[in-house]
Image (spheres, grey):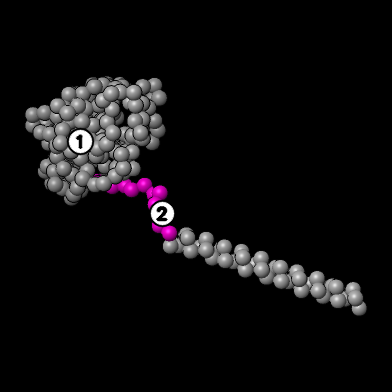
């Protein structure tokens, strides 16, 4: 009889313990679900894309693009596919994305066609008033250039690499003062041996600015499928 009583008490104690444990776990699980459902993801990268299909002529004012400098970037139709093309009027220029992003950012473009002495490519931390900014582009004659632009549209060459290849995707990103150059998703090791350039030691390093397309050249350079964000 005593053994039966002890067994019953033990059983009731175990049931009570398991019930409490299930309640606690259920509450925690419910709270976890609530966090997943109702708490916004603040860590997701923000991205802006543009395939330029709705653009016509000068892209200044088309969507969120704003021109700085005197060179033009125009939308052109190539066999039913809109692209942007360099169309230099007198000097260097850039079209920056008038959207708000952090200072750690990237710009990506597909290089469609080019010719000698025609420059166009992705830019980061571009000034909205002058030539300050980091940019990467090729001249079509065998080289590409990673540069730091100055206010007067002069520049400093930071690194050299292989020229751009039609059909390839080129991405320039910056985090802190570390610039990274990607070709088709991989670091372009022709740039400074590993695709990475650290500008933190420079007294002219650029702390902030806009995502942009930068260019200098008379036609023939065409790019498409812009993507930018942080």
- Please give the name of the residue rendered at 36% of the width and 47% of the height, measured from the top-left corner: 45
**Quadrant housing residue 153:** top left
Residue 101, above or below 172: below
What kind of element bears circle 2?
loop
Residue 230 appears left or right of 60? right
What's the distance in space between the residues labelled 1 and 2, CA to CA? 30 Å
Residue 25 image offset from top left, x and y in percent: 61, 64
Q: From this viewpoint, is residue 69 visible? A: yes
Residue 152 image offset from top left, x and y in percent: 14, 26
**Within 10 angstroms of label 2, few (less than 14), some, or many (20 or more) residues?**
few
Q: Which residue is mark 1?
A: 127
Q: Earlier in the sequence, mark 1 or mark 2?
A: 2
Residue 213 appears left or right of 32? left
Residue 132 image offset from top left, x and y in percent: 20, 31
Given residues 60 and 158, the one toward you in this image is 158
In the rendered structure, are the residues bearing label 1 and label 2 in contact, judged by CB atoms less than 8 Å apart? no
Which quadrant would the C terminus be assigned to in this image?
A: top left
- Please give the name of the residue rendered at 52% of the width and 61% of the height, measured from the top-left corner: 32
Residue 25, above or below 75: below
The magenta-colored residue range is: 39-51
Residue 143, above or below 65: above
Given residues 187 and 29, the one toward you in this image is 29
Question: Is residue 195 found inside the magenta-colored segment of the image?
Answer: no
Q: Which residue is mark 2?
A: 41
Given residues 146 and 82, the one toward you in this image is 146
Q: From this viewpoint, is residue 168 visible? A: no
Residue 129 image offset from top left, x and y in percent: 15, 36
């Amino acid at each position: 009889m005593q053994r039966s009583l002890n067994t019953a008490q033990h059983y009731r104690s175990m049931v009570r313990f398991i019930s409490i444990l299930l309640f606690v776990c259920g509450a925690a699980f419910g709270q976890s679900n609530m966090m997943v459902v109702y708490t916004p993801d603040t860590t997701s990268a923000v991205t802006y894309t543009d395939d330029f299909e709705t653009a016509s002529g000068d892209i200044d004012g088309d969507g969120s693009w704003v021109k700085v400098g005197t060179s033009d970037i125009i939308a052109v139709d190539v066999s039913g596919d809109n692209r942007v093309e360099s169309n230099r009027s007198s000097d260097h220029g850039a079209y920056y994305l008038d959207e708000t992003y952090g200072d750690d950012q990237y710009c990506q473009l597909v290089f469609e066609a080019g010719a000698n002495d025609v420059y166009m490519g992705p830019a980061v931390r571009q000034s909205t008033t002058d030539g300050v900014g980091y940019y990467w582009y090729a001249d079509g004659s065998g080289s590409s250039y990673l540069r730091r632009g100055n206010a007067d549209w002069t520049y400093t060459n930071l690194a050299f690499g292989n020229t751009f290849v039609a059909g390839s995707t080129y991405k320039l990103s910056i985090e802190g003062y570390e610039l990274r150059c990607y070709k088709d998703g991989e670091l372009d090791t022709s740039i400074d041996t590993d695709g990475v350039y650290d500008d933190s030691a420079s007294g002219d390093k650029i702390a902030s600015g806009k995502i942009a397309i930068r260019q200098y050249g008379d036609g023939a350079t065409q790019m498409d499928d812009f993507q930018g964000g942080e």
